[in-house]
Image (cartoon, grey):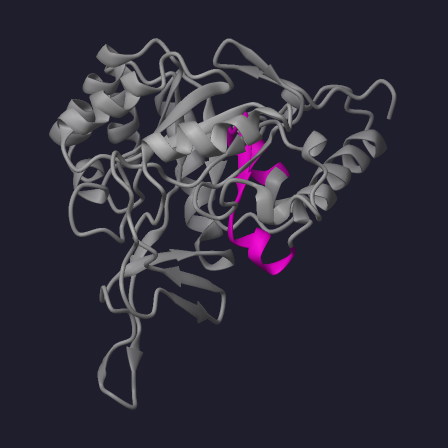
Amino acid sequence: MNNLDISVKLLGQTFRTPLTTASGTFGFGQEYAPFVDFQNLGALTVKGITPEPRLGNPGQRLIETPAGLINSVGLMNPGVEAFIGEEMPRLRQIQTPIIVNINGKTVEEYGELSARFNNVAGVSALEVNISCPNVKEGGMAFGTKISTATAAVRAARKATELPLIVKLSPNVTDIGEMAKAVESEGADAISLINTILAMDIDLRTGKPILANTFGGLSGPAVRPIALRMVYQVYQAVDVPIIGMGGIMDWQDALKFIMAGSSMVALGTANFVQPDVINSVAQGIKVWCQQRGINKITDLIGSAH
């Protein structure tokens, strides 16, 4: 594998592998440190950050389904100031690019959060989350209408020169149209998909299981939908794509790259197999070596 290059270039940077983590599934990396070789990560995407600390949604927040998970965590996080002061110093030590996922309740908050990271060492990019389906305000409300999605991206773009990755909701009619709209407002990359709005009912009570009623479905059940949307967005925009949604192994990861993803994010798979990033990185290397592929970038969009 000496001649194999699995690095990718995007956002004005070189990432050593095409693998990152899906926000909200990897915390700030501490829990996974005993299992994951961070050298296998091109970047670490942290859980969503909001202006103020959030305790998250009450009651039951996670449901296992036959082919995935429904989560309604509700953006539990320590808030931007605690994250910068307490988490970033430790994150800088792992020598892996950090992507910070930001969430606002208003357009103005997206701008304020973006500006707050301008001089924070170690932040490689911001992921503007306009697609969270399990909070009652903000989140997906911004990502389901072009007018609000573009307003949030415009505010973030005006506030920072950091690379902006815009995370899209799958809960829209035309994903390509939405992708083009945020690209026109200055998105440097697009990540997709976020979870699909879902719910379940407890037969004993006859009521929704989740205290928030609705949550986001992730895992293998959504993979074919996510793959389709990545394929469509690749045809619609010129900026790079970070693909995610039910990627469970190296085979899934390669399919997303072939569909048009420059990088891929592992999410639910981390809960099932805490060291999955290692096996995905190794599987990609072996597969490429067996087929005489020297650069992973040769596969990006090759399915088109």
- The answer to whether residue 167 of the structure is visible from this angle is no
Q: How many marks?
A: 0
- Furthest residue to the right? 2
Q: Quadrant of residue 169?
A: top left
Quarter containing the N terminus: top right
Camera-nearest residue between 222 and 208: 208
Q: In this rendering, is residue 95 above or below 71?
A: above
Q: In this rendering, is residue 94 above or below 240?
A: below
Picture coordinates of residue 183 (x, y %)?
A: 30, 18
Q: In this rendering, is residue 81 above or below 163?
A: below
Q: Is residue 64 left or right of residue 50?
A: right
Residue drawn at point x = 41 percent, y = 48 percent: 225
Q: Is residue 199 left or right of residue 46?
A: left
Residue drawn at point x = 77 percent, y = 24 percent: 293
Residue drawn at point x = 69 percent, y = 43 percent: 36
- The answer to whether residue 29 of the structure is visible from this angle is yes
Picture coordinates of residue 144 (x, y %)?
A: 19, 40
Picture coordinates of residue 150 (x, y %)?
A: 18, 24
Q: Is residue 297 left or right of residue 154?
A: right
Residue drawn at point x = 56 percent, y = 57 percent: 271
Camera-nearest residue between 300 and 45: 45
Residue 260 included in the magenta stretch of the image: yes
Picture coordinates of residue 153 (x, y %)?
A: 23, 22
Q: Which residues are magenta?
A: 254-273
Q: In this rendering, is residue 301 above or below 193?
A: above
Camera-nearest residue between 262 and 56: 56
Residue 256 included in the magenta stretch of the image: yes
- Furthest residue to the bottom? 204
Camera-nearest residue between 257 and 144: 144
